[in-house]
């Protein structure tokens, strides 16, 4: 909707030359003139030092926060897991001819690293066990939308995380009237309906035809040059076991009984492990909004918090709610069902979000939120670089942003804006968010 973009640009020019001090009236006029449905937008801005409410609109209504939720869950996750927590994938020997892989649900584990572990297996191995008890077998979040199962930003997740749970495909343009060539180096069994033709531009449509099978992928459109695309893995356990089997067979290890589930025994001897720290993962979630990493860590932290062998979303939810009670954040009306904000069953108010941000204003984890020019703010609010740290959200008809703002006068504020106006495009919603925050920076 070009109207709102032109209007906001004109109003921004007017504002830069204005010395007006009114805040509530100014924001209200902006919203009124923008054409946004004011019943579909919620705003809360509070002074970060006093907690005093500066501006609000529908700040008590419950609405899905989208990925702004990560700014709520990550401080809780980080506190529970601790700064020294490591994702660890471990290989154990069991007797003379058996081995066990104990999974750590490492969201960054690659097939190359898995192969490095498997290279420690004796060539005479007859059995391979996998201990996947660290997380439950639920690989899809509550309220996640079934028609998003091909969205590479929200793949399935769990103990068997590998290669970001995505299958890399290379598509070669058709030659001499032949079909396009689709290269699948993972060897994961996929059936392709290949309707790709050669064109001047690369424009592809890729979807799963579950009516035939979950492994049936339909590809249509045109390719101009060799193109790489990714498809979410529909069965992450099967994918992990296949890559393990390939790595074993490359060592000429052929198991008699295949790969079977099993628990680690005290008598098992560790042979090798792959570990990585938690800090880069926290930054990845807050700066790049990585859903799979956020969900994995939510369950891991929940399991640790509840002293469970197996992490679950329900244990993560309990962890979060107990954190709110501990810090006297009123969570009586809100509902959290996952760690990333992907589910539309999550319901919060902007008042709740700003209360949470107030409690965590000195939390070092919040320093990992991106400023302008970084992560999901790479192309947004550039004049406010180092004056703002914020988590953005985009999901279906929802656009959101929440974080910390230092005004031109040096005052510090917490804010949350959630817009669910279905008439506005995503770009228009974000333009409106940016304008409100620029106004707040200049006037507060």
Image (tube, rainbow, N blue to C red):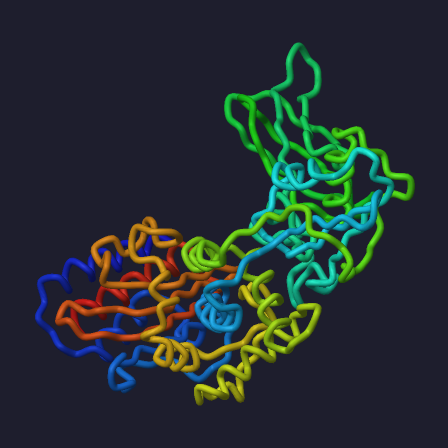
Q: Position of residue 397 (x, y in %)?
A: 51, 62
Which part of the image, by quadrant, shows the C terminus?
bottom left
Can you name the residue that lies furthest to the top here? Answer: 176
Residue 182, quarter of picture:
top right
Residue at the spot 20% in from the left edge and 57% down from the top edge: 10
Q: Position of residue 146 (x, y in %)?
A: 69, 57
Residue at the spot 43% in from the left edge and 60% down from the top edge: 286
Relative vertical location of residue 174 with respect to residue 270 in this rendering, above or below: above
Relative vertical location of residue 133 with respect to residue 27 in this rendering, above or below: above
Q: Nearer the viewer, residue 239 or 89?
A: 89
Q: Is residue 374 left or right of residue 15?
A: right
Q: Nearer the viewer, residue 175 or 246?
A: 246
Which part of the image, by quadrant, shows the N terminus?
bottom left
Give the tally of numbered discs.
0
Residue at the spot 27% in from the left edge and 63% down from the top edge: 388
Residue 117, quarter of picture:
top right
Q: Can the viewer see residue 425?
A: no
Q: Is residue 399 left or right of residue 89?
A: left
Q: Is residue 69 left or right of residue 205?
A: left
Q: Position of residue 170 (x, y in %)?
A: 61, 28
Q: Can the viewer see residue 204?
A: yes
Relative vertical location of residue 168 with respect to residue 69 in this rendering, above or below: above
Q: Position of residue 3 (x, y in %)?
A: 32, 56
Residue at the spot 68% in from the left edge and 46% down from the top edge: 271
Q: Is residue 56 left or right of residue 155?
A: left
């Amino acid at each position: 909707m070009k109207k709102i973009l032109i209007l906001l640009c004109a109003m921004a020019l007017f504002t830069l030359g204005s010395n007006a001090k009114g805040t509530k009236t100014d924001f209200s006029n902006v919203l009124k003139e923008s054409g946004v449905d004011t019943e579909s937008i919620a705003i809360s801005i509070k002074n970060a030092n006093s907690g005093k409410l500066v501006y609000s609109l529908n700040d008590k209504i419950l609405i899905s926060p989208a990925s702004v939720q990560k700014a709520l869950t990550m401080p809780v996750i980080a506190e529970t897991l601790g700064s020294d927590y490591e994702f660890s994938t471990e290989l154990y020997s069991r007797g003379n001819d058996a081995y066990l892989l104990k999974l750590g649900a490492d969201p960054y584990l690659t097939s190359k690293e898995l192969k490095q572990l498997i290279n420690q297996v004796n060539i005479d191995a007859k059995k391979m066990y996998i201990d996947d008890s660290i997380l439950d077998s639920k690989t899809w979040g509550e309220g996640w939308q079934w028609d998003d199962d091909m969205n590479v930003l929200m793949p399935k997740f769990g103990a068997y995380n590998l290669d970001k749970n995505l299958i890399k495909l290379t598509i070669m343009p058709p030659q001499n009237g032949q079909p396009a060539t689709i290269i699948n180096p993972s060897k994961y069994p996929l059936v392709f309906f290949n309707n790709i033709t050669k064109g001047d531009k690369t424009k592809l449509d890729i979807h799963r035809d579950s009516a035939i099978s979950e492994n049936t992928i339909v590809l249509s459109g045109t390719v101009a040059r060799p193109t790489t695309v990714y498809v979410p893995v529909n069965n992450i356990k099967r994918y992990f076991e296949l890559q393990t089997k390939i790595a074993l067979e490359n060592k000429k290890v052929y198991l008699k009984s295949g790969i079977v589930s099993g628990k680690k025994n005290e008598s098992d001897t560790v042979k090798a492990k792959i570990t990585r720290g938690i800090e880069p993962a926290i930054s990845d979630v807050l700066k790049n909004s990585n859903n799979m990493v956020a969900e994995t860590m939510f369950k891991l932290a929940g399991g640790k918090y509840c002293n469970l062998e197996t992490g679950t979303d329900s244990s993560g939810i309990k962890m979060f709610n107990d954190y709110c009670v501990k810090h006297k954040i009123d969570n009586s009306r809100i509902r959290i069902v996952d760690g990333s904000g992907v589910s539309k069953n999550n319901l919060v108010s902007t008042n709740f979000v700003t209360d949470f941000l107030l409690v965590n204003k000195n939390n070092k984890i919040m320093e990992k939120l991106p400023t302008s020019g970084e992560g999901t703010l790479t192309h947004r609010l550039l004049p406010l670089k180092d004056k703002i740290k914020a988590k953005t959200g985009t999901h279906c008809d929802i656009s959101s942003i929440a974080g910390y703002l230092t005004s031109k006068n040096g005052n510090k504020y917490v804010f949350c804006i959630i817009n669910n106006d279905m008439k506005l495009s995503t770009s228009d919603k974000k333009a409106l968010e940016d304008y409100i925050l620029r106004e707040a920076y200049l006037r507060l």
